[in-house]
């Protein structure tokens, strides 16, 4: 399978990361453009849902290229792989998941993840509820 051409290269994102004044949101924008396929569309949709669920969320760029959303600590990450977009919730094992969104990293004591494959529909309301629960967990006093 031939790799799709991209409008933003990985090298460009790496150089943006090294520049002062380039914020995480700009780097996430660039990653979405770089992917230019279903993964970019999915990452953009996930990002929008995170922001809808928590308008005060802080976007970060960690570990040399992973979008991270935080509020009182890390809520979740948005990793992209060849066949999956993975949302890993830092404290997912402590969250109730009544609709069964978590489908990956189920064996650990801390994290839980949602693997989203090409063509899969996201239960948007359930995901937003999970994000709000993660915010509540992080901001308990």
Image (tube, rainbow, N blue to C red):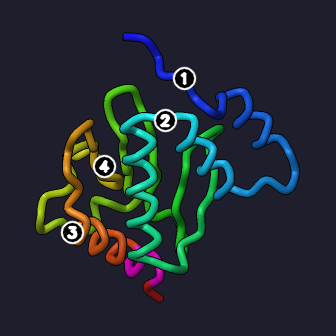
Q: Are marks 4 and 2 in contact (CB under 8 Å)?
A: no
Closest to the observer, 18 or 4: 4
Dot 4: what SS?
A: strand
User: At which x and y percent is residue 71?
Assistant: 53, 73
**Cα distance between the residues tagged 3 and 2:** 26 Å
Query: Residue beneath label 4, please?
Result: 113
* In the image, farthest residue toward the bottom: 141
For marks 1 and 4, the one nearer the N-term is 1
For marks 4 and 2, the one nearer the N-term is 2
Query: Residue beneath label 2, please?
Result: 36
For marks 3 and 2, the one nearer the N-term is 2
Query: Residue beneath label 1, please?
Result: 5
Image height check: is 86 above or below 23?
above
- Give the residue displayed 45% in from the left and 42% down from the top: 40
Residue range (magenta): 135-139
Q: Magenta span: helix, strand or loop, mainly?
A: helix
- Disc nearest the viewer among 3 and 2: 2
69 lies left or right of 140: right
Image height check: is 98 above or below 101?
below
**Cα distance between the residues tagged 4 and 3:** 14 Å
Disc number placed over residue 126 in the picture, else none: 3
Q: Residues within 10 Å of mark 4 (few under 14, many from 20)?
A: many
Q: Residues within 10 Å of mark 2 (few under 14, many from 20)?
A: some
101 lies left or right of 76: left
- Give the residue displayed 28% in from the left and 43% down from the top: 115
């Amino acid at each position: 399978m031939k790799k799709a051409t991209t409008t933003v290269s990985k090298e460009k994102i790496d150089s943006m990361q090294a520049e002062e004044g380039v914020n995480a949101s700009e780097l996430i924008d660039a990653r979405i453009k770089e992917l230019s396929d279903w993964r970019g569309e999915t990452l953009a949709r996930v990002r929008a849902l995170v922001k809808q669920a928590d308008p005060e969320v802080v976007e970060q760029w960690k570990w040399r290229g992973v979008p991270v959303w935080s509020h009182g600590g890390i809520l979740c990450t948005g990793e992209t792989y060849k066949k999956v977009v993975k949302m890993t919730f830092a404290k997912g094992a402590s969250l109730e998941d009544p609709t069964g969104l978590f489908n990956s990293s189920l064996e650990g004591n801390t994290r839980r993840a949602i693997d989203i494959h090409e063509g899969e529909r996201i239960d948007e309301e359930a995901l937003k509820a999970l994000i709000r629960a993660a915010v509540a967990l992080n901001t308990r006093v």
